[in-house]
Amino acid sequence: MVRACLKRAKLDRVHPIFHVGSEEALAILLRANAHHAFLFAISRFTRTDPLALRAAFSRALRALASSLADVVGPSLWGLKPESSLIKSEAREALEYLFQVCNQAAVMASF
């Protein structure tokens, strides 16, 4: 019962991160190394962890990666400024995410 409550608390903490609205919010997540934390948490999941919890962390990581790509990539329809204060930090974080994904794919092929 206690374990289920703790897992539910983890799930509730992940929900606000799904939509990274401003660059300030993204900068805070980058400084807190949220991308590292998400990957670490996801790597520690077991089959006994609730599917809702695993899905929530996956969605949060996807939202974070998408927000990073929005900052690093070109402006869509010219709606955002081309320069960003966190562009280099976002690029490094995005490169880290893809580096880890590529390493995981190589390790899975062995």
Image (cartoon, grey):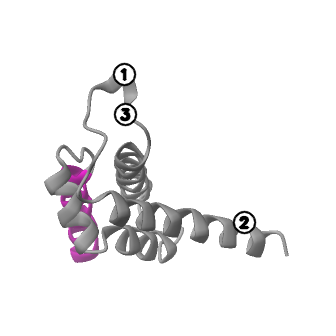
Q: How many marks?
A: 3
Tell me if label 3 and label 2 are in contact, CB under 8 Å: no
Viewer-proximal residue among 59 and 85:
85
| Residue 42 place in picture, x, y as percent | 46, 69
Secondary structure at numbered mark 1:
helix
Mark 2 lies on residue: 105
| Residue 56 place in picture, x, y as percent | 36, 53
Of badges 2 and 1, the one in the foreground is 1
Viewer-proximal residue among 11 and 79:
79
Q: Give the residue type at disc 3.
A: Ser
**Disc nearer the start of the sequence (3/2):** 3
Q: Which residues are magenta?
A: 1-17
Mark 1 lies on residue: 77
Q: Which mark is residue 75?
A: 3
Work out which quarter of the rendered image holds the C terminus and state it.
bottom right
Tell me if label 1 and label 3 are in contact, CB under 8 Å: yes
Residue drawn 25% across the image and 37% down it: 81
Instruction: Count neighbours of disc 1 (C-alpha within 10 A) and say few if under 14, some if 14 to 19, many if 20 or more.
Output: few
| Residue 50 place in picture, x, y as percent | 41, 60
Q: Give the residue type at disc 2.
A: Ala
